[in-house]
Amino acid sequence: MKRSLRVGLLGAALAIALTACTAAGTSGTSSTAGGGSASAATALYGGTMTTAAASDPETFDPAVCTGATCWNIMRMVFDRLYDYDGSTSNLKLQAAADFPSVSADGLTYTMKLKSGLTFSNGAPVTAKDVAYSYARVLDPATKAGLAEFWKGIAGADAYAANPTGLPSGIVVVDDLTLAITLTAPNSSFKYVLAMPAGSIIPSGTGSTVSTAPVGSGPFTLAKFEPGVQVMLDRNPKYWDSPRPYVDHVHMILGVDPDNQVLMLQKGDIDLMGSPIPPAKFLQVTTDAKYKAQIVTIEKPSTYYLTMNMNTPPFNNPKVREAVSYAFDRTGLLKLVNGQGKPATEFIPPGVLGNSGETMTQDQNVAKAKSLLAEAGYPNGFDTQFYAWNVAPFSALAPQMQQDLKAIGINADLQTLAPNTFSELAGSGKAPLALTFWVADYPEGSDFLQALLSCATAVPQGQNFAYYCNPAMDADVQQALAATDPATATAKYTDASKLMLADNPVVPLYFGTKTEIRGANVGNYFPQPIWGWDMAEYWKADGTSSRS
Amino acid sequence: MIWWILRRLGQMLIVLFGVVSLAFLLVYAVPADPASTLAGPNASAATIASIHAQLGLDNPLWQQYFGFIGRLLTGDLGTSYVLRETPVFGRIVAALPTTLMVAVGGILWQIILGVPAGIFAAYRRGSWVDRLITFLSLIGLSAPPFWLGLLLIYYFAFTWGLFPLNGLGSPVFWYLVLPTFTLGAGGGAWYARMTRTNMIETLDSPFVRMARAKGMPERVILWRHSFRHIAIPLLTMIGLDFGYFLGGVVIVETVFGLNGIGRLAFDAISNLDTPMIVGTVLFAAIFIVVVNFIVDLLYSVIDPRVRLNS
């Protein structure tokens, strides 16, 4: 036995060496994008969709959930008034009977529920439940990190100070009708209603929803064993029959992403909750055997560098402009297995406000050096550069450090755990910070307002550059008040140009998301905003009718 | 004997108090805010401040510390900041059996692999067997557990399908083979080296020469007399290894997807989940001091010269 073990280990070592050589030989090959579905054309029923996640869902409370694992579960258990349609960023009706009727001043949204909707416990879904669900997001006791999105509702602050009844801006008109009044026009508000925090729970169940969630979604929570598994069963009362197609969803918890790939390849799971790990990316995406199972979509995201404008020498516009010429975007993308495309502006494609224009600078070392000399730094300077200590940042940051060195900036790179990074950068202690943002909803305000507005240029905000330009903020407000997408896009474009002329950030690349699905998954498509649309998927070995 | 046990128990309590206090204070030394982590990236400063107030994080450190110690004395380890509504104590108790199984399995592997190899190498010192065992020990010591774990998973679970890929199932023994081997392989190599050295020293001792001169069979010399002689340092190492293994299980449980204290600690540290960090550290410390206490007791059993009241 010992001998066979030694032989096995020797063989394994040789095989790994060969694998490494093969991977090196194929580096630079772009990933393939297969079809979204290799499934039968007609829906199939039954079976269990087995998935894996690296960590536990932190809660089953949709008002509190911010992690990827619980986001996926929220979509299975709860309905919202609106949801995203297929793999697009377009809204579709979910619990709502129609899209909101917006008053002429753009302030009041009136929404009607579908009639006959019930929660999984049999109780009817009413406007009172929707109002309760929204109000508790604003209640500080809920500890909803996403409450900020709901602060535009009239009376939100007063309600937060004294959370009784409902905020003045939320009115239950009748059993099926709800009216919400905002303090300022906000065209993105409809998307806020499609976020997890917009999930509808039965009135009065806020104290139990985190452990015993009841929703009107396609699945119900059957079992949760912390650290081990989550089991969800099909909700037989679901309004959108025949969805969901599978009878159960089994989520195995605590599975390392490398193991998730192996389990999927072996057929032990159908879907991975984690992205394909960088070390396995080329091996998986270039293997012809899995070509039909690979799906690549644009992830509405921007990876970018921030320069803290309160910290010398980045308070000097010439210095910031010099840094904007420092980076080779194509080279950086090679380091992340080509998962993205060079950023040409700040708002990514697929998000309202993306102009399609080029507002960024290509790498130009001579120009950068000349700008630094003009700024009074002919010999460059020393500074600190912070980044997350996980992929892709751990791969990008050292190369960016070299790019900065080439123009004369000696950046002391420190890679940190994400929460430490956020604390340092948020509190204004990071002269340079490498970060990213994925859209919470597909409108430019989620980038320009959330990341670069004057309101967020405060400690613990996401505006790591501490950029504040009232003119840009005004453009964003006008975009939010616009009644047609063309006007909004024009205003967002103006805002982007104004902002990038000041160079508080250097957009590096727009991300893409490449996934591998199990061979037995039918009708699969990834969702750019959410994770999975489990109600729509089926098992390829399912039955043609529900027994 | 009673006084010895009481004195040791007192020392154990002091150690546990020190470890827990240090863990609590170290978390606060990290430049990161649990409330920000909990609230997520979209939270406003007002929301974070509200969470601060609700968790008592805006109180002075000394107040938070004494509040924590007070709750601890009543057996309340608090609720996880990240896994909402999850009592730390219950979560750790649920994870404890897995960690115990992995740690004990790892110890068994290192004894099974290391001790016979070390004795054999010492007995045949200078031979090709000795050199081979020394060489293999070097490889075992050099192999990082995460690398070895991934290698074993890839070949023994994925490619050849001999063992399960992930988690625990039935029969439990089968699911534990690879994780425990991963944990114990490096230790086995270390045990082989240590056992060899001690055994060589013992085999050169006058009492062994005397036994041989009297015609005692080699088997009896080796296993009954010499092995007993090296048992005390072995036992000490086993006690210390439980501490070492609690570091190792973090990697092994993460790589093999096991729901144990190591993975809990890893996730808690990544998320700055203070109650869970302190809880896992406390349980790990209890584990280590109890095992070392048992080891001290066993000394007197193995070596009658050791008197517990001395």
Image (spheres, coloured by chain):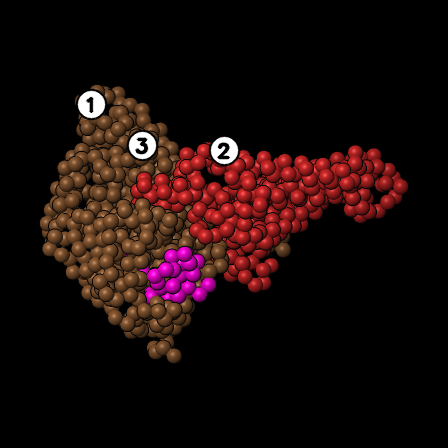
Chain colours: A brown, B red
Q: For this rendering, which residue is in front, B56 or B276? A: B56
- Which mark is first along the chain, 3 or 1? 1
Say which amino acid is labelled 1: Ala
- Image quarter for residue A409? top left
| Percent position of residue A384, x then y | 33, 29
Specify whether residue B119 is in view: yes
* Alpha-carbon span between mark 1 and mark 2: 48 Å
Distance in Å between CA atoms under marks 3 and 2? 27 Å
Q: B201 above or below A61?
A: above
The chain carrying label 2 is B
Identify residue type, mark 3: Gly
- Relative to residue A225, is residue A149 depicted above or below? above
Q: Nearer the viewer, residue B124 or A167?
A: A167
- Asked whether B196 falls inside the magenta stretch, the response is no
Name the residue that disc number 3 marks: A428
Disc sitting over residue A375 in the figure: 1
Q: Decide if residue A24 is on the left or right side of residue B125.
A: left
What's the magenta region?
A198-223
Is residue A216 one of those drawn in magenta?
A: yes
Secondary structure at badge 2 equals helix
Badge 1, how many Cα within 10 Å: few under 14, some, many 20+? some
Q: Nearer the viewer, residue B206 or A155?
A: A155
Q: Main secondary structure of the magenta part?
A: loop
Q: Secondary structure at mark 3?
A: loop
